[in-house]
Image: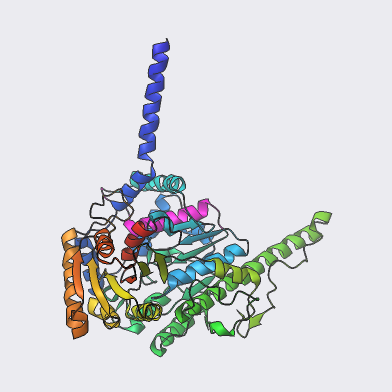
Amino acid sequence: MCSAILRGVVVSRSLTRMFSSKHSYEEAVRKLNSLQSLKARIEEIVKEIKAGKRCTNMEDMENYLLRTGVTLSDLDQLSVIHVAGTKGKGSTSAMCESILRRHGFRTGFYSSPHLVAVRERIRLGGRVMSEENFARHFHRVYDKLEASQAFEGDMPTYFLFLTVLAYNVFLQEKVDVAVVEVGIGGALDATNVIRKVPVVGITALGLDHTAILGNTLPQIAAAKAGIMKPGCEAFTVRQPPEAMEVLRRVAGDVKCTLNVVPDYKSYTFPNGYKTHLQNNLDAFHTNASLAIQLAHSWLRINQLQTMNLRNALKRTIVNSKVIQNGYKNLDAPYGLDVEKNLLDGGMVCQVPAETAQGLSECKWPGRYHVVDATYAKFYLDGAHTKESIEICASWFSDNNRNQDKILIFSVTGDRKPEILLKPLADLGFTHVYFVVPTAHKAINEHNDNYSKVEQADFISRCERNAEAWKQLNENAGHSNISVLECVHDALVSIKNNNKNCNVSVLVTGSLHLVGATLCILDPNLNT
């Protein structure tokens, strides 16, 4: 009898381990990485877009959501602030979420890409999801999609799956508001499956993802403006005239308001908060102004909806003649005063303490991010457009006038390296490392930063980047140049070759590169 019981215990433990392994975080990452599109498929999609083939992202997303038990009507219940743009949409979204959380609301936040761990993309209450919670939600959604396949391989791609997962998480966790950053473009982006959006933000526009979105600023503006919905409140920053014209036309077509946010200097802040941003660059100030207006627009709308509900409840109670003491404060104001502290057009001018605290407490790593190591000081910025790399170059130059300078660079997608390298060419780098944007050479499918792109393709791109650097100008050509297979090799080289420690290293060109560097320098994102 005892031996039989013991055998049962052993079998039970084995089953538990097997179940735990099947539903572990590591297995979730492996399954997620299996959904990445191969290079050939990505090129095929780009060709289809250029040929004018209709994109089915919205229909696909509706289908995937339905297979997980979420209808579009269910999704209508989720209150979303949707943010698109070329530059600054991540930091704008992060500041907006931080403000709303400081005002006491339970927030969800969906962004991309991640730096160190894929869990960074879906946040609850400002916190990155734990491995356990991520795995629990992941396997529930993945298993439903896998079980409902109409044919072998009938699964969403990597980003589409994460978007389906994020909307499932936010509904399951019953967040008050979800701040959702667009992936690419807007109109055809997977996040745009949502039909009812009270507040929309569009950050600074520029040329990026041109193979997908178009080669002109008006084309890109039209793609980004595609997130505007009837009746929403849309906000944007000052844009080039040709882009602003498109935004205004689209807003008129869908019948929503479009407001240009005020200059950051026009706000009145509580004492001690005005300069407490992560960075005092003008671009960051612009993003902060947009975040303030997005958050307060949602607060006003939420307040009005709550007041309407309370008034409806009050009328019901009065009509039924069951007024009780518990309802004696139904006429009391709720939250912010909708008439207070507003600019013309209904925008905030006096910043409440909670909003200022939300701004000052917001951390958004990988953008204008400084990390001190024992052998060098690292300046990390995931700039990957002409405009953002120009700002990055100015930021780095202003902070490093006397030190020796080193560049670590990588570029992804269809971006042209000569355009991104030109603003960096005259900064006086003594050594330039063109590296594959992974932390280490040996990264397998269980790693958060695994890529299906072949190493040979990465190396070939690094060599093209090095050639572009040589051709920029004579001074740039005199830099020492290395092409390396991973960030780790670059950091070892810097450490071994710079004994005086008075060296500043700029890491830029790609958020994937910045993430790979942080995996080594600051894997917990503490700085």
Image point 23% across, 52% down: which residue? 442
For the N terminus, give its image quadrant. Answer: top left
x%, y% of residue 83?
46, 71
Measured along the vertical axis of the image, is residue 340 above or below residue 173?
below
Q: Residue furthest top?
A: 1
Image point 41% across, 87% down: which residue? 240
x%, y% of residue 227?
44, 72
Image point 28% across, 72% down: which residue? 407
Q: Look at the image and say whether residue 164 sits in the magenta stretch.
A: yes
Q: Look at the image and say whether residue 527 sits in the magenta stretch.
A: no
Residues 105 and 114: in front is 114
Measured along the vertical axis of the image, is residue 286 above or below residue 527?
below
Image point 43% across, 47% down: which residue? 131
Which quarter of the picture shows residue 429?
A: bottom left
Measured along the vertical axis of the image, is residue 374 above or below residue 150?
below
* Magenta region, residue range: 152-175
x%, y% of residue 216?
31, 83
Which quarter of the picture shows residue 249?
A: bottom left
Viewer can see residue 322: no
Residues 155 and 31: in front is 31
Viewer can see residue 318: yes
x%, y% of residue 397?
36, 80
For the C terminus, give its image quadrant. Answer: bottom left
